[in-house]
Image (spheres, rainbow, N blue to C red):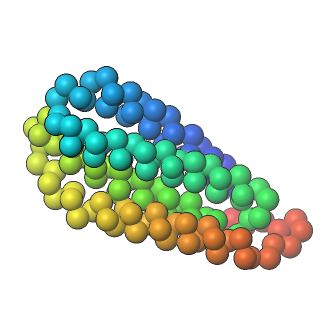
Amino acid sequence: MKIIFLRLGAIFALLAVLFGAFGAHSLEKIVSPDELHTFEVGVRYQFYHAFALLITGLLTYWRPNRYLTIAGWLFMGGILLFSGSLYGLVLDESLGLSLRWMGPITPIGGMLFIFGWGALLRATFVKVKEGETVH
C-alpha cells in the first residue's frame, strides 16, 4: 500500500505536465480565454495534489497510519472529481459531448481536497510504535 501513493503522485504529476502543455500549445486555439483559464486551474490543482500524494506516500514510510491512507485516497478522488470535471467542462463542446452535468461535481472534488488535508493533519497526531506497519 505504501508505494501506491508514490506511483499515483508520479502519474498525476506526469499527466499534469502533459495537460499543461496541451493547454498551452493546442487548447488556446479552440477554447475561449476564460475556458483556458479554467483548464489551467484544473492543471494547477492537479499538480498541487500530485505533490500531496507524493508527500503522503513518503510519510507512510516514516509514520504509517490509517489517516495517511485516507488522505491519499481523498487527494486522488479530489484530482479526479475537481480537475477532471474542469477538463470535461472545458472540452465538452470541442469533443462534441454534453458534459455540463459535471459542473456540480467540481465542488465535491474541492471538498475531497479539504478533507484530504485534514486527514493528513490528523495523521501527524497519531503515535506510531517502532516497527509498526499499516495495511
Residue 115, position as x, y percentages in the image: 49, 71
* Quadrant occupied by the C terminus: bottom right
Residue 32 appears in the rendering: yes
Residue at image location 63% in from the left, 71% down from the top: 121
Residue 10, position as x, y percentages in the image: 57, 40
Horizontal arrangement in the rendering, residue 81 relative to residue 75 (left or right): left
Residue at image location 16% in from the left, 43% down from the top: 92
How many discs mark residues in the rendered view?
Answer: 0
Q: Residue furthest right?
A: 130
Residue at image location 16% in from the left, 29% down from the top: 30
Residue 40, position as x, y percentages in the image: 34, 41
Residue 2, position as x, y percentages in the image: 68, 54
Q: Is residue 32 above or below residue 103?
A: above
Horizontal arrangement in the rendering, residue 67 relative to residue 107 (left or right): right
Q: Is residue 20 above or below residue 71?
A: above
Horizontal arrangement in the rendering, residue 56 relative to residue 35 (left or right): right
Residue 95 appears in the rendering: no
Residue at image location 50% in from the left, 34% down from the top: 14
